[in-house]
Amino acid sequence: MLMARDVTYQIFDMPDGRFSVMVTIEPDKTMVRTGFATQAEASAWVEGLRDIMAALGAPVSLAFPEYPGSLPLNEILAFIRKAPSEAD
């Protein structure tokens, strides 16, 4: 019997004005779906994923619930570049 896996997602604003969805299936599978014209289109895709995964017994939840909207990728990358590393 297959065990249900946790599935998380996050929607990102891309620098070109489109949206992407990053999905992680625990423990180690990550995929990115790119090219959504609007955040609503990306959200609709997530709802379809939620339906499919529910049939498999795997709940889909927001990776960062404190950020329910889309996250601006440029700002995230700038933050990561400024963050101190373990080597610092």
Image (cartoon, rainbow, N blue to C red):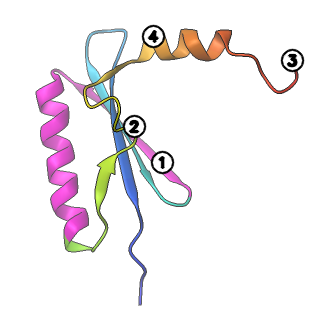
The residue that mark 1 highlights is 30
Q: CA distance from mark 3 to mark 4?
A: 23 Å
Left or right: 88 with respect to 80?
right
Q: Residues within 10 Å of mark 2 (few under 14, many from 20)?
A: few
Residue 15 part of the magenta segment: no
**For the residues marked 1 and 2, what is the alpha-carbon distance in whole angstroms?**
15 Å
Secondary structure under tag 3 reads loop
* Residue kind at label 4, given as amino acid type: Asn
Residue 22 shown left or right of residue 57 in the figure? right
Q: Amino acid at mark 2?
A: Phe
Identified by mark 3, the residue type is: Asp
Tag 1: amino acid: Thr
Which residue is situated farthest in the front direction here?
Answer: 66
Instruction: State the residue at coordinates (25%, 26%).
Output: 69
In the image, residue 73 lies at what x, y percent? 42, 17
Q: Kindly identify which numbered label has been placed on residue 22.
A: none
